[in-house]
Amino acid sequence: MAAGDIVTAPGHIQFGDVLLGPGTPYRWQSLTGWEDSPGLDSGTVNRADAHGAWPGRLLAQPRTITVDGLVVRAEPGAVGAVVRHLAAATALRDGELPLVVRLDDSPPLLSWARCIRRSVPVTRGYAAGVATGGALQFEATDPRRYALDEQLVTARLPTAEPGLDWHLDPGPEGLSWPLDFGPPGATGALVAVNDGDAPVHPVISFRGPLTLPSLTNVATAERIEYDITLAPDDELLVDTAAGTVTLNHSASRLYTVTPQSVPEATFVLAPGTNNFAFRAAPGSSDPRAACSMRWRSAYW
């Protein structure tokens, strides 16, 4: 089941394969921590010889999300099975699952989280099929929230257009109508739009054949570049969030990074439009070579 597949109405919250909200056995009253800004670690340092401080980096802490006023309803005698289904879906685990929230008619947003606390009070109404006053608490180690739709853009290495065909072979026939400019060339330009308000780490793919693949942010001049030769069937995958560089999804090639390259974790898409230039070693122009970028718009 894909993230958000069963989120169809305002008030729906999907965690893994369990759905809370209208039309389900699980209703809730309040959601805290979802629209709040996450906690911050501040690198600000007080000035030693003057008023004020030196401003430092602000780094977001994990996001804590709490569903309060949880009400579980089922047929009399069946509430236990419904509660156990919720317990299985929110069991303690090491890995994070998609947490999708839709509050109104706006598109839902996605976070990856773990359930760190579950409360389902057992009162006299339990046997009648009602458990009230419950709560669920989630922790998202990445405090950003993401659009459900993943975006993908691809660029080819720069190639010139062949231009007009003057039909000079075998004789000087000249131009003919309609004019034939040949297949379009390529610029190596790649445009990625982050519709959110938080920077996002993309996943970048270089495909051969090419040597010395690189991708440069046109606005900041930041570049990732790798001293490697890729065969036609090779893929070099750069996960900027994890800081990994792998060849064909298996062997690490992080050691091929060049001195001109910035750390992968700092190569992000800022909110708004981001322009990049895909390049390779001088003389590289094979039309099969490509660079792709995948990302989701991110929101604080």
Image (cartoon, rainbow, N blue to C red):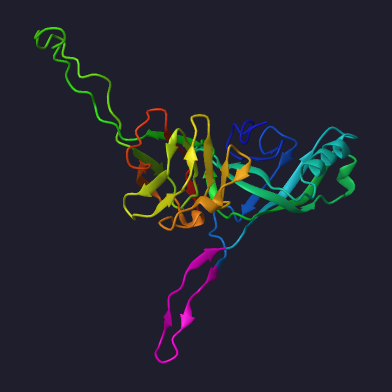
Name the spot of residue 222 as percent of width and height, x first: 38, 55
Q: Nearer the viewer, residue 105 or 155?
A: 155
Instruction: Please say whether residue 153 is visible from this viewpoint.
Output: no
Name the spot of residue 139 as percent of width and height, x first: 67, 55
Outermost residue toward the bottom in this view: 49
Instruction: Please say whether residue 115 is visible from this viewpoint.
Output: yes
Name the spot of residue 264 as percent of width and height, x first: 50, 54
Quarter of the rendering occupied by the N terminus: top right
Question: Is 141 on the left-hand or right-hand side of 280?
Answer: right
Question: Is 281 on the left-hand or right-hand side of 31?
Answer: left
Name the residue at 52% across, 72% down: 42
Name the spot of residue 79 as percent of width and height, x first: 85, 38
Total numbered circles = 0
Q: Nearer the viewer, residue 174 or 242?
A: 174
**Does the segment drawn in magenta span residue 44?**
yes
Task: Give the vertical position of 236 relative to 142 (above or below).
Answer: above
Name the residue at 42% across, 84% down: 52
Question: Is 238 on the left-hand or right-hand side of 274?
Answer: right
Name the residue at 39% across, 41% down: 192
Q: Which residues are magenta?
A: 41-60
**Does the segment drawn in magenta span residue 112?**
no
Task: Give the vertical position of 93 relative to 12 (above or below).
Answer: below
Name the residue at 66% across, 49% down: 113
